[in-house]
Amino acid sequence: MHQARTTCPYCGVGCGVLAQVDGGRITGVAGDGEHPANYGRLCVKGSALHETLGDHGRLLRPRVDGVEVNWDTALETVAERLSSVRRAHGNQAVSAYLSGQLLTEDYYVANKLFKGFLGTPHLDTNSRLCMASAVAAHKRAFGADAVPCCYEDLEEAELVVLVGSNLAWNHPVLYQRLRTAKSRNPLLRVVVIDPRVTDSCEIADLYLGLAPGTDARLFNGLLAWMADKGRLDTIYLERHTQGLADALAAAREDDTSVAAIAADCDVDPERLETFFFWFASQLHVVTLFSQGINQSSSGTDKAGAIINCHLAGGKIGLPGAGPFSITGQPNAMGGREVGGLANQLAAHMDYPTPGAFDRVTRFWSTPTQIPTLPDGPGHKAIALFEAIERGEVKAVWIMATNPAVSLPDSNRVRHALAQCPLVIVSECAAATDLLPYADIVLPTSGWSEKDGTVTNSERCISRQRGLLPPPGEARHDWWIMVEVAKRLGFGEAFAYGHPGEIFDEHARLSGFENAPEGEGHRAFDISGLAGLGREGYDALAPIQWPVTAKAPHGTSRLFEDGRFATPDGRARLVAVRPRGPVQRLSTARPLRLNTGRVRDQWHTMTRTGRAPRLMNHRAEPFIEVHPDDAAAHGVNDQQLARLQGAGGDYVARVRLANGQRRGEVFVPMHWTDQFSGMARMGALLAAHLDPLSGQPELKHGTVSLAPC
Ligand code: SF4
């Protein structure tokens, strides 16, 4: 028996895990006391990881058109059919849809293959559903998609504000850290801003149960209040930012009296002013935001309104201060690092980044092969499946995610997939709602088998280690793509034999011709991790980017010197004009729909659904509703009821919840047709998008409620 270090594959906290490996099995897991994300803690999902393993329910052999084949046939078929689509319809007829479940090395190879050598920009990822709005807001404010904070800031803060985040359920180890910090420091205050009373409220000194979609109004109001009360950090603003006048003018287009803001947000005015006072009077404030902010048709502006307040108060770049986007998935950040969003080219460079096209072309060129990079961005997730439905995109390779469940308007996504001439699916699980749409099915390795790196919410790169051989004929995602690349004639550019070689190339590209700070400098730079060699890569300890010659041990906190990644080094406050959710209430659909995770499940439950004890918390899907609404709509606790939404129906048992606002219902996101029959969240929601980030409004729909 031996103990091995790896990381948890679930949420964006990215906890270090010690796995007991015994006789070709993992017999137990514990928190890694040396990992800076969790210092030995694990949540209930992480501590059940070893109970989710085993060959049962795994996809074990490749299939083409429903027939099991060997790998050579599968890989040849993938290469032939992709080539055939490109020949007949052009490069942009092929596409890829990836996942924050992939490791950075997988992501890197996919981005290079599709954008670099297949010549299509249409490569996007389910990270679009998670934090694309935060990415857009970071770029607009800081000049780069760079999270300023680190987890230690929760322990250094005097005030922690949770907005649109049920940290207790969705990032449990961070919540444990915050709870411990609060018990050690009685002066640390916690404010929860969320339409629902969640378990995170247990440690709240103040709770604001705002109306859905009013976050930007609230933070615009805070900005105006700070200005009116003389609470702006004028020296910081003058030295390090621009845009205050426009941001304030936009905030003042609405009535900025506390009474008016409180009325618009449907919160108690005294509580609201208490929050404003606390925020304005503390320097060390962390505002931690998550999907409640991002999954909105105005998510970028909501995040921007939060960032404005931090810049206006100089509450950034200090211990215990900053706006802190917490990602949902373990490697949502890693995908951004390699360019895994359709609007990115590679290595945190967007298509318009000066010199990026030429730089990446030269970096990826080999003596005999020159990449054929597309010259503009591709379709973001929702637009990609719409292009498939229109017949413009004729081939999609989906890896480690299930858009047939998780995208809004999922019945339409299924229709698009059904008519797509070529659907390739790389997957671990033998049965998912997506597989019936696949022409080619490729079995892949999963957690405990995959070997590579992930980056968590605080920019910390950690190794996820391959401890067991993949079952059956399952293979690593990067290997599958490399083999396809060889068969497409790109072998020289994809001559990788180990994930460490891919990581090395990724690290070198991140620093390739990086300009000096303030001259188009790219904040993401891990060139200090280039040249590790196999041993160094295997032994790589968690480290936060940037990692450069100047910062060889990584960087805990960004913007400490007040310089940002914009051309002039100044952060931008932005003018935010609050907009409500797109879907409006009607007599046909009189209730607001909110959606989210439950504590013990992960995504579509292909892994957590295998551990019986994780079903004890919530064994089945549900509809959470306030008792008054239940009475008004004729449904009782535990009764089966039907929601009708813009895209379809959802049937589950009712759970009465006093913490639910009146006029609103909540459903979990995890259950699929396979697990539940008729409780697929994605079927209820229309696909309304944030115009800047392309992130869908998964946190808001309208529904009717009736007994079954
Ligand atoms: Fe895994 Fe997140 Fe739990 Fe940590 S908090 S053990 S990363 S699910």
Image (cartoon, rainbow, N blue to C red):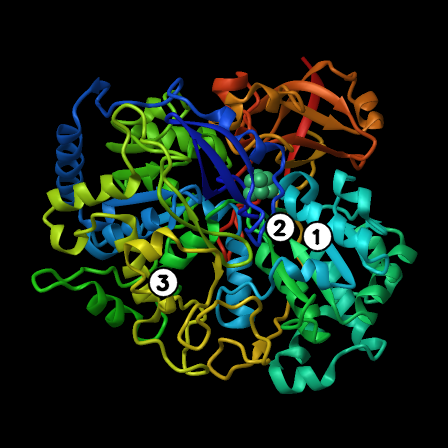
Question: Label 1 is placed on what type of residue?
Answer: Val
Q: Is residue 600 above or below residue 102?
A: above
How far separated are the C-alphas under marks 2 and 1?
A: 7 Å
Question: Label 2 is placed on what type of residue?
Answer: Ser
Q: Quadrant of ligand 1?
A: top right
Q: Is 617 in front, or is 683? A: 617
Instruction: Tell me the element at label 2.
Output: loop
Q: Which residue is the site of mark 1?
A: 163
Question: Label 3 is placed on what type of residue?
Answer: Ala
Asked if labels 1 and 2 touch by Cβ distance under 8 angstroms, the answer is yes
Q: Which residue is the site of mark 3?
A: 347
**Which corner quadrant holds the C terminus?**
top right
Q: Is 55 in front, or is 392? A: 55
Q: Residue at x 57, y 76 (%)?
A: 571
Q: Position of residue 172 (x, y in %)?
A: 65, 42
**Side of 209 where 653 appears, left or right:** left
Q: Is residue 315 above or below residue 477?
A: below
Instruction: Tell me the element at label 1.
Output: strand
Sequence-earlier tag: 2 or 3: 2
**Side of 204 where 454 appears, left or right:** left
Q: Residue furthest left?
A: 368
How far separated are the C-alphas under marks 1 and 3?
A: 29 Å
Q: Which residue is the site of mark 2?
A: 290
Sequence-earlier tag: 2 or 1: 1
**Side of 297 where 50 appears, left or right:** left
